[in-house]
Amino acid sequence: MNSCEKKQLKITAAKVRLGIIEGVFHAKSGHPGGSLSAADLYTYLYFKELNINPEKPKCPNRDRFVLSKGHCAPGLYAVLAERGYFSTEELKSLRHIGAMLQGHPDMKGTPGVDMSSGSLGQGISAAVGMALAGKLDSKDYRVYCLLGDGEIEEGQVWEAAMFAAHKKLDNLCLIVDSNGLQIDGPVADVAGPEPIDKKFEAFGFDVQIVNGHCFDEIEAAFAHAKTVKGKPSVIVAKTVKGKGVSFMENQVGWHGTAPNKEQYDVAMQELTAALNELEGC
């Protein structure tokens, strides 16, 4: 990745973060913390990694993405809007009655959403099924699935992981957004899943640990995952919950809380300043 490409990804990620705050504020509810922590991952996936075409969102040969931690839909919606699946103005209707963008991803109502999700642990099972279908149909598409580190406390996650390794699904790449916080507090205090890497290794995965806010590391990890044969891959991305908004960073209270007008203004000022700095450098 050259410097111009990296700069553009940073600019896009800044716009995604602005979209997240815009959506959650107008909804008066939602989950900004984990959406912000995954913004760089969303950005890399949709602007570099995935073989997709917004003009043909149901193309059978497209790569698939499943947001297993479905409550972080504000981030998915923001990146889909930036990628051209729908207007960024739609973000302001998040969670409104009758709106296209509901509180959790809806594959029937939102262009670009490959799987409805929200009940934690179930998204990965759907992704594994998609990957198996690709193998059975001799298709070349890859399947990507984003999970939360709190989410992987769910037993269903490990049943799906065991099945994926048993079926040698090397067209499957999981990403764990490891931001250290979940709704009830620090992940380590609730039902700590560490060591995450060793657990996935024991379940037969190729494992990488990266800084989830470093595009160079993210790029290298996804490039490596494509070379893995005979087993599924997982990228454990170390991130900061609420990344980009100073008063939200590493604060568990922002897992599922919408900002008020004063907080919204501060957040938008910070994010806009960061975007302007990137565009001006």
Image (cartoon, helix red, strand yellow):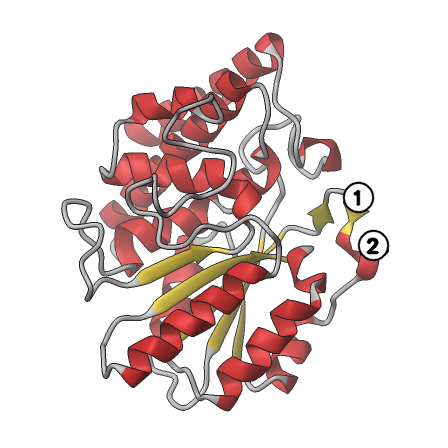
Q: Residue at x 51, y 54 (%)?
A: 212
As drawn, the residue found furthest toward the left would be 55
Mark 1, secondary structure of its residue: loop
Amino acid type at mark 2: Val
Image location (x, y in percent) of residue 165 = 51, 85
Give the alpha-carbon distance from disc 1 to disc 2, as whole Å: 7 Å
Q: Which image quadrant: the C terminus? A: top left
Image location (x, y in percent) of residue 213 = 49, 50
Looking at the image, which is closer to me, 28 or 242?
Answer: 28
Q: Residue at x 22, y 50 (%)?
A: 57
Query: Does the CB distance between marks 1 and 2 fall below 8 Å?
Result: yes
Picture layout, residue 132 above or below residue 42 = below
Reading the image, the residue beneath label 2 is: 190
Picture layout, residue 147 above or below residue 227 = above
Count up the numbered dots: 2
Reading the image, the residue beneath label 1 is: 184
Q: Residue at x 44, y 66 (%)?
A: 127
The quarter holding residue 83 reads top left
Q: Residues within 10 Å of mark 1 (few under 14, many from 20)?
A: few
As drawn, the residue found furthest toward the right would be 189
Picture layout, residue 85 above or below residue 18 = below
Looking at the image, which is closer to me, 100 or 259?
Answer: 100
Image location (x, y in percent) of residue 118 = 56, 48
Q: Residues within 10 Å of mark 2 (few under 14, many from 20)?
A: some
Label drawn at residue 12: none
The quarter holding residue 80 reads top left
Looking at the image, which is closer to me, 276 or 228?
Answer: 228
